[in-house]
Image: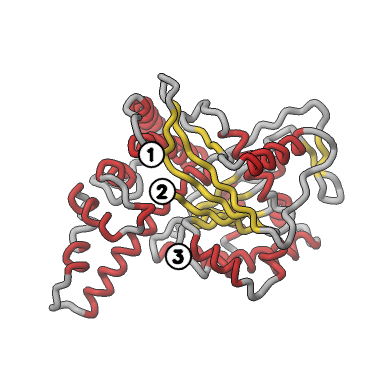
Amino acid sequence: MKTYKIITLGASGAGKTVFLASMFKALSIQGDYTFFLEVEDQTKRKRLNATYTQVITGDNWPQGTKYSDVSEWTFNCRVKIPTLETYTACQFTYFDYAGGRLTDSEDDVEFANIVQQSSTILGLLDGHKIYSLMKDNNDLAVDIFLNKDLPNILKWMHMSKVPIHFVISKWDLIEDEFSLTQIRERLLKIPQFEKLIHLRNQANSPVRLIPVSSIGSGFAIPQPDGSMKKISGAVPQPFQVEVPLACVLPDGLQARLSELKEKQEEIGKTAKNKPNIFSSVLGIVGKATQISIAVAAWFLPPEFQFEQALLYKLSEGIGFGLEGREKTSIEREEKLNQERNASLKLVKDEETALMHAVDNFAVIQNNLERFFPDSELILT
């Protein structure tokens, strides 16, 4: 089974563990999206459920991860067909760790190894600190974010070539006053941030800015000391907690195909008149044919070696297909929904379950790009 590893980088208090618990709760039952997440490990499943229960009940919030812990959460992505049979499509493994390990340690070998193994890096930006930044508050929260939290997140990101998802937590604190476009513009004024985006754009490796809320609007209100007070009787309505997961496969494939093209270009520069199998095969990648996509698959890492039909479907959405990426629109949404409904009827094994899961991911990604067109960080 194909497994995708995601490490969550974020300072203490950014909401990493609560985000995972909320994502699991939102996707633990097959609903609007025709797939669901399952945690086989009973102990870990209970921990996630207990964390979410603490979020929605009582006055206190869940405690952060202990400094020595690196929690590994494996979610099976599964599909239930109309006859109630269930098939597993793939796995997502999230690494959650104490925020202090990100900001306090200069030489953490274990942590560095996890970063290197990851398929995607999820950088969780504390929405409370982002709000203070946008308000131009000259307070400690902004100082910590600019001089400690963000530099350490960026430092670890520079160690890897995989896609990056900057996730703004606690979006419910921000959405009424600032748009994602305004936040994007402010972050790009930070030289270190802008430099990372520039380098990733040069490598054609995806970078996204994704707003999420583990509890949604109207569940809690900020206090003067920066804490959040729950509103009695309020019901949480998580917002976009499924989006980062849905972007892992398409963004990962784009990054890997871009790496292959870069290697081909390097070989071309050093051996112009010396044909070799790697250069010859990759010479047709980018010409947008089903044959070229199938050939490229020979050189992809195992987790991205899909059957030709699925690989081609994924490649169409990232600019490597015949028509390239389509303009995000209502018409595209209708097309994607039709494809998703059709593929559900064809699910009969792991391969077809993954095909259907990818159709769901396309719907989710399209909604992100439709409602937050500036979520993809591309410098002009």
Q: Residue at x 23, y 80 (%)?
A: 270
Amino acid type shown at disc 1: Leu
Q: Say which quarter of the image contains residue 46.
A: top right
Sequence-wise, which precedes: disc 2 or disc 1? Answer: 2
Question: Between residues 188 and 315, which one lies in front from this camera angle?
Answer: 315
Dot 1 or dot 3, earlier in sequence: 3
**Residue position marked by numbered label 3 in the rendering:** 161
Local secondary structure at mark 3: loop
Q: CA distance from mark 2 to mark 3?
A: 20 Å
Q: Is residue 176 visible?
A: no
Q: Is residue 347 above or below residue 45?
A: above
Circle 2/circle 3 CB separation < 8 Å: no
Task: Count numbered badges in the picture.
Answer: 3
Residue 130 position in % (x across, y down) = 69, 54
Tell me the amino acid under the disc marked 3.
Lys
Viewer-proximal residue, 157 or 307?
Answer: 307
Sequence-first disc among 2 and 3: 2
Disc 3 crowd, CA 10 A, few/some/many (<14, 14-19, 20+): some
Residue at the limit of the structure toward the bottom, as seen here:
270
Q: Is residue 206 left or right of residue 219?
A: left
Q: Amino acid at mark 2?
A: Lys
Return the residue at label 2. 2
Q: Residue at x 17, y 77 (%)?
A: 272
Q: Which mark is residue 354?
A: 1
Residues under numbered marks 2 and 1 in contact, where contact means CB atoms less than 8 Å apart: yes
Q: Which circle, 2 or 1, is nearer the viewer? A: 2
